[in-house]
Amino acid sequence: MTGFSSIAVYVPDRVHTSSLGQVTDVFGDAGAPGLPTFDLVSCTDRPGRLTTDLGMSFTVGEGLDRLAEADLLVVLPSERPHEPSDALAAAIVAAHRRGAIVASQCVASYTVAATGLLDGLCATTHWRFVDDFAARYPAIEVVPRVLYVDEGQLLTGAGGGAGIDLYAHLVRREHGSTVANAVARHIVAPYRDGGRAQFAPTSAPVDGDEEQVSAVLTWATANLHRPLPVSELARRALMSTRTFSRRFRAVTGTTPHAWVLHQRLIRSEELLESTTLPIEEVARRVGYANATVLREQFIRRRGIPPRLYRHAFRR
């Protein structure tokens, strides 16, 4: 894995203030312990003074020509959907053809969709706009209620805090789990898989549920080498299996079984990247009976076997 190093962030006028913070949280603190050094630059249609959706004023000094130099192009959202200028659309298409990764979040998905690059692919946007997005761009398969959609060179994210999830996923995909976990620790943010729902359940957990479930998650993460049936997790939470499963989903947005599978995969990635342990030993440490089971799960979720993953990362 070589990953990306140069990042161009397109900033529109009336940009979402939170999206500015998210992209700089993940990519902007170059040189922090355990993190790669990213060359991060902001650019806009006409360099000069811009205003955020909250009315804060700031200066962007670079123009669209900087999009031609980046490994990763991040398109930030403004306060409402809008189509790009001809110059911006041409710059995004040129960057994509050159091989750059193009990522957008929230209503910035409209900006990328208007270029035609997403035609025939899956994409997402803020859940409030999915119907309008689908009607405006019928050639795109809109995926509602997910945090982000990864189509390889093109990625789209949902609204709100999903920007953090999208960028953390990109770091994990391109730089590996070890670096991604270092980023997560640095910004104090957990890793959330893209299939998680964009918004909280309608029935919020009762007081104490989150603390009880969190304690079980901490224990399970430290004991991935053990069998972790739902009954065992529920017992440790002092709940019935049915109650625990319901409250677990309310707190995490997924099922205990899916969560455990995902944690085993993340831990196996870390071991493949940072150790020379035999695949059989990696499988044992993450709770699989043998290397064959690990291989099947790894291929199903990552598309390649563990041995090739390790080779690609080290290369």
Image: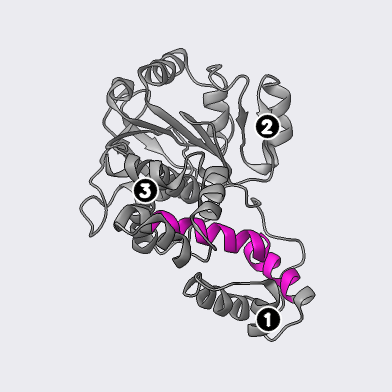
Which residue does the numbered mark 3 point to in the structure image? Answer: 176
* Foreground: disc 2 or disc 3: 3
**Foreground residue, 202 or 174?**
174
* Residue 147 appears anywhere in the view: yes
Q: Residue furthest right?
A: 242
Residue 12: quadrant of the picture: top left
Using residue 170 as the reference point, say whether residue 46 is left or right of it: left
The residue at the point 41 percent across, 48 percent down is 172
Badge 3 local density, few (<14 within 10 Å), some, or many (20+)? Answer: many
Across and down, in percent, residue 292 comes to: 53, 52
Whether label 1 touches label 3, CB < 8 Å: no
Badge 2 local density, few (<14 within 10 Å), some, or many (20+)? Answer: some
Q: Which mark is residue 207?
A: 1
First in sequence, mark 2 or 3: give its number: 2
Is 235 drawn above or below residue 106 in the view shown? below
* Residue 55 appears anywhere in the view: no
Using residue 91 as the reference point, say whether residue 118 is left or right of it: right
Q: Is residue 165 magenta?
A: no
Instruction: Say what secondary structure mark 2 lies in.
Output: strand
First in sequence, mark 2 or 1: give its number: 2
Q: What amino acid is found at the position of numbered circle 2 in the picture? A: Val
Q: Is residue 267 magenta?
A: yes
Which residue does the numbered mark 2 point to in the structure image? Answer: 142
Give the spatial CA distance, label 2 vs label 1: 36 Å
Using residue 214 as the reference point, say whether residue 33 is left or right of it: left
Q: What amino acid is found at the position of numbered circle 1 in the picture? A: Asp
Is 118 drawn above or below residue 145 in the view shown? above
Give the spatial CA distance, label 1 vs label 3: 36 Å
Give the spatial CA distance, label 2 vs label 3: 28 Å
Instruction: Say what secondary structure mark 1 lies in.
Output: loop
Badge 1 local density, few (<14 within 10 Å), some, or many (20+)? Answer: few
Q: Which residues are magenta?
A: 244-270
